[in-house]
Amino acid sequence: MRAIARIALATCIISLVLAEAALAQGERKAQSKSGPKAAGVLAADRGKFQVLFDGQPVGEEEFSVSPSGSEWISRGSVEIKIPGGGSAQVDAELRTSADGTPRSYRWSSAGQKKASGTIQFEGTSAKMELKAEGGQPFVQEFQFETARVVVLDNNLYHQYGLLARLYDWNAKGTQTFAVLIPQDLTPGTVTVEWGGPQEIEGQKLELLKVRSADLELELYVGGGRLMRLFVPGAKVEVKRE
């Protein structure tokens, strides 16, 4: 489970910023007033997140979540600025069923080196093909105990908004989710716990605490949408513009 720490935006940003710098109910009666719908119900969304490290802007993500026939498509494009010049970019597209169960995922990254990958989800298995610049294609298959796997990939912050949608706001309490970090080839689990209502800069939001074995993130949700994300121990903040 040590590798699950890479879910941390801190690790994502530090790996890009430091490593690359050195090298490279309203909606539904049963839902709570300020939380999203009950578990498994996605909703259309579109916007931008600003990424800050130690209070300084280091990147921005544009994203969209929308229905397409029987599927939902979540797209994100993020660019991280590298101190001293240059940048790293990640683009991704996730296709899921209406209850959030993943069907396929593809991503590409461009920085000092280029890489891309595709994943096909079938039941409780996920088959990935990874292509890295200068290397041979690599194929790996992952097995999970559930088909509802949450994709939380490096530097794609809108995916935490999907995690918040999958949280059962009616039941609240602590809930466990199977996750996959495609760029790191890392499967694992996280727990999500309701932290109560909060007010930040005049916004009334709901707090979700996301934990792995050695990491904690804070998600702040309003009206079913992810508004802010903090990694308290790493000086990382992501906020909706």
Image: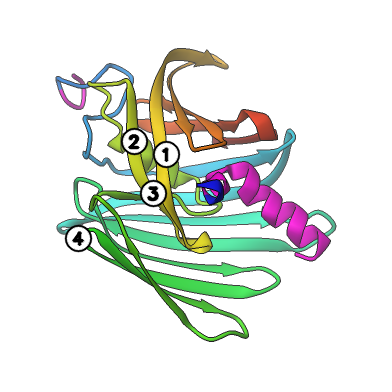
Q: Which mark is residue 123?
A: 4
Near mark 1 (Cα within 10 A), the count class, few <14, some 14-19 or many ≥20, is some
Please report whichever mark, 4 or 2, sits nearer to the chain's N-terminal start. 4
The segment highlighted magenta reads 4-28
Residue at screen point 55% across, 62% down: 90
Please report whichever mark, 1 or 3, sits nearer to the chain's N-terminal start. 3
Near mark 4 (Cα within 10 A), the count class, few <14, some 14-19 or many ≥20, is some
Real-space Cα separation, disc 1 to disc 3, in angstroms:
7 Å
Amino acid, disc 2: Thr
Asked if marks 3 and 2 touch (Cβ < 8 Å), the reply is no
| Residue lying at the far front of the rendered structure | 1
Please report whichever mark, 4 or 3, sits nearer to the chain's N-terminal start. 4
- Residue underneath mark 2: 176
Local SS, label 3 = strand
Near mark 2 (Cα within 10 A), the count class, few <14, some 14-19 or many ≥20, is some
Please report whichever mark, 2 or 1, sits nearer to the chain's N-terminal start. 2
Residue at screen point 75% across, 64% down: 24
- Residue underneath mark 3: 179
- Residue underneath mark 1: 190
